[in-house]
Amino acid sequence: MSANRPLIVALVISGALNLFLIGGIAGAAWMRQEARREAPAAAALAQRPPLWTAGRDLTPEHRRALRRSLREAALENRADAQAARAERRAVVEAMADGRFDRAEADRRMAAARTLESGVRAKVDGRLTAFAESLPSEERQVLAEGLKRVYAPRQKPRDEQAGERPRRKNRQTP
């Protein structure tokens, strides 16, 4: 019986390894299926296209000028945009740490909105100044592109049918 013992141990280890691999493959397949099921809803909630895509039908010279103008505006506003994100992160961290103060959170969120609004106003000002510099025909092309960018986002199919989107149940420890 002692001669067969290494063989039995090897078979048990091999069986356990095979079981582990099969479980891993099955788990990966299940995760992939779940991701596919949630992908249409996530795609419908995707953000609008970037602002620079509004100029994709402009002449190459004007398209480059639009991108340059928007890039300069982004660089000028980088500090305010980062400050707005920092304010929001601070609120989220306070929620997670248990040191949440509603008045402080409201103040920080208002500060973030004010910063973001200022950034948006500066970018919009750059965009309208750029549009003013365009010939009339190119301005019309830009307007069509902006209609695409500013078009309302589509709701997921579940919401269109009057159903609420499905949420995963979270287990609390």
Image (tube, grey):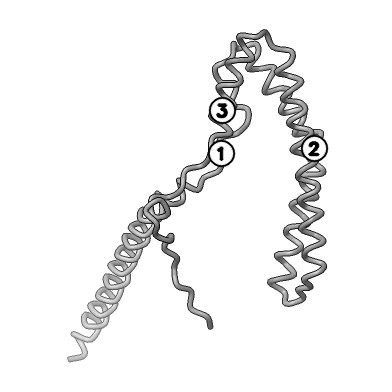
Q: Position of residue 172 (x, y in %)?
A: 52, 80
Where is 52 relative to 156, above or below? Answer: above
Q: Does the CB distance between marks 3 and 2 fall below 8 Å?
A: no
Spatial CA distance of label 3 from label 2 is 24 Å
**Quarter where residue 149 is shown:** top right
Q: Quadrant of residue 5?
A: bottom left
Q: Residue 168, position in %: x, y?
A: 44, 68
x%, y% of residue 46? 51, 45
Q: Are marks 1 and 3 in contact (CB under 8 Å)?
A: no
Write the residue at 32% across / 71% down.
20
Q: Secondary structure at mark 2?
A: helix
Amino acid tagged 2: Asn
Left/right placement of residue 113 relative to residue 3 reads right
Q: CA distance from mark 1 to mark 2?
A: 20 Å
Q: Amino acid at mark 3?
A: Lys
The CA distance from mark 1 to mark 3 is 11 Å
Q: Earlier in the sequence, mark 1 or mark 2?
A: 1
Look at mark 1 in the image and give the residue it sits on: 48
Find disc 2 in the rendering and name its residue: 77
Position of 7 with respect to 28 (left or right) is left
